[in-house]
Amino acid sequence: MELDKKIVREMMIDFLRLMNKFNKLSKQTFDFGTGDVLYPAEVHVIDEIGKKSGVTVTGLCKLFGVTKGAVSQIAGKLSRKGYVTKLRNENDGKEIILSLTPKGKKAFDAHIKLHDAIDEDFARTLGDIPPKQVQQFTDILKRIENHVDVYISLKE
């Protein structure tokens, strides 16, 4: 069964509106108890470093779907601000291993606490939706992401 083009168009408009809201949110800064303000991209790098011991710049760019240069730029900024230490991998001199400083750990802990509250609120918002429907929605998002990846690869 083929979807009606009008429905697809409405869905794409809704999706673009949501992406624009996420873009707006991504430009807002937050203080995670360190006295500095951090952008969501910065604190999400801190979050992944805090979750995974020995995470590398390459690992983060694969996870976030961004370039090595983008992650390197954020990691450098976080290093200068005192949140992250960078160490060359002894086995692969090109690879940079990232770890949190005590200041970075403080921001990481505060971010986890914030996300716990946000996730709880989000779960309440979606609480009346059957888990099967939520899983279907997640599957649809992944399918859309894969489709967008095709268009991205055409431009590269």
Image (spheres, grey):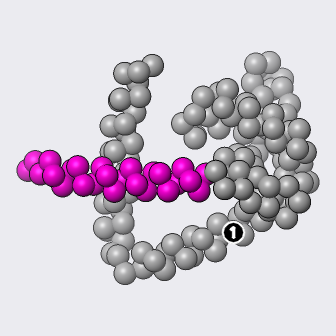
| Up-down relation of residue 117 to residue 13 (above or below) | below
Q: Is residue 73 left or right of residue 87?
A: left
Which of the two residues, 58 or 43, is positioned nearer the viewer here? 43
Segment tinted magenta in the rendering: 1-26
Q: Which residue type carries mark 1?
A: Leu
Which residue is located at x 41 percent, y 21 percent?
Answer: 155
On whether residue 56 falls in the magenta region, the answer is no
Which quarter of the figure has residue 60? top right
Instruction: Tell me the residue at 47%/51% (across/down).
Output: 20
Identify the residue shown where x is 64% and y is 71%. 116
Res 44 seen here:
no
**In the rendering, at what x and y percent does residue 73 appear?**
74, 32
Instruction: Please identify the quarter of the rendering in which residue 148 is found.
Output: top left
Q: Is 11 one of the magenta-colored residues?
A: yes
Position of residue 78 relative to residue 105, above or below, is: above
Q: Main secondary structure of the magenta part?
A: helix
Q: Secondary structure at mark 1?
A: helix
Q: How many marks?
A: 1
Residue bearing the label numbered 1: 114
Write down the quadrant of residue 99 in the picture: top right
Residue 78 at what x, y percent from top left? 82, 42
Q: Percent from the top left, x then y, of residue 9? A: 23, 49
- Residue in the image at 64% along x and 51% along y: 27
**Residue at far left of view:** 1
Most foreground residue, 78 or 92: 78
- Taking the image as shown, residue 66 lies to the left or right of residue 134, namely right
Can you say whether 102 is above or below 94 in the image? below
Residue 137 visible from this viewpoint: yes
Residue 115 percent across, percent down from the top left: 64, 66
